[in-house]
Amino acid sequence: MKKVELKDAKPYEAAGHFGMVALRLQHKETTGVESFWVGLSHFLPGGGAEMSAANFERVYVMISGEMTVITEDKKEIVLRPLDSLYIPAGEKRYLINRTNMPATMLVIASYPKS
């Protein structure tokens, strides 16, 4: 077992994201977890992520605030506290915080298949 206290979580750069700070909670590099990683993302008002896909599965769990997820076909999904969303590998999405309050999201993702 390996506990990670929030005060010890390290920020990391998430490609294609803006107005956001990401913290690595569980990861190969921090705790040795091998199948998935867990991050905590804090989005400022107007913050989000560009339309893109990843080559791994992701689950978003809203902790606080509200985020809008826009699919490639322009469908909008609003996530509020304790809502969750599964995104399969290869599926594109755009993220935006359209509110005037910060939003916090837990991100759980598998590692890319090699």
Image (spheres, grey):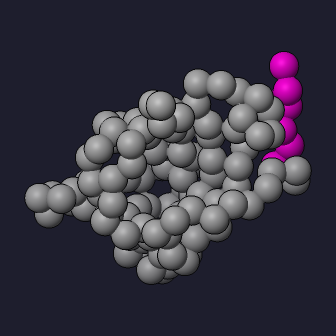
Q: Which quadrant of the view contains residue 19?
A: bottom right
- Residue at the limit of the structure toward the left, as seen here: 73
Residue 28 falls left or right of residue 42? right
Instruction: Name the chief secondary structure element in magenta.
Output: loop
100 shown above or below 11: below
Q: Which quadrant of the view contains residue 60?
A: top left
Residue at (64, 60) in percent of width and height: 22
Q: Is residue 75 visible?
A: yes
x, y (%) of residue 92? 27, 54
8 shown above or below 100: above
- Magenta includes 2? yes
Residue at (49, 69) in percent of width and height: 17
x, y (%) of residue 94? 32, 64
Magenta stretch bounds: 1-6
Q: Is residue 84 visible?
A: no
Residue at (43, 61) in percent of width and height: 66
- Magenta includes 29? no
x, y (%) of residue 67? 40, 62
Residue 70 falls left or right of residue 66? left
- Residue at the limit of the structure toward the front, as seen here: 114
10 shown above or below 103: above
Residue at (63, 51) in percent of width and height: 40
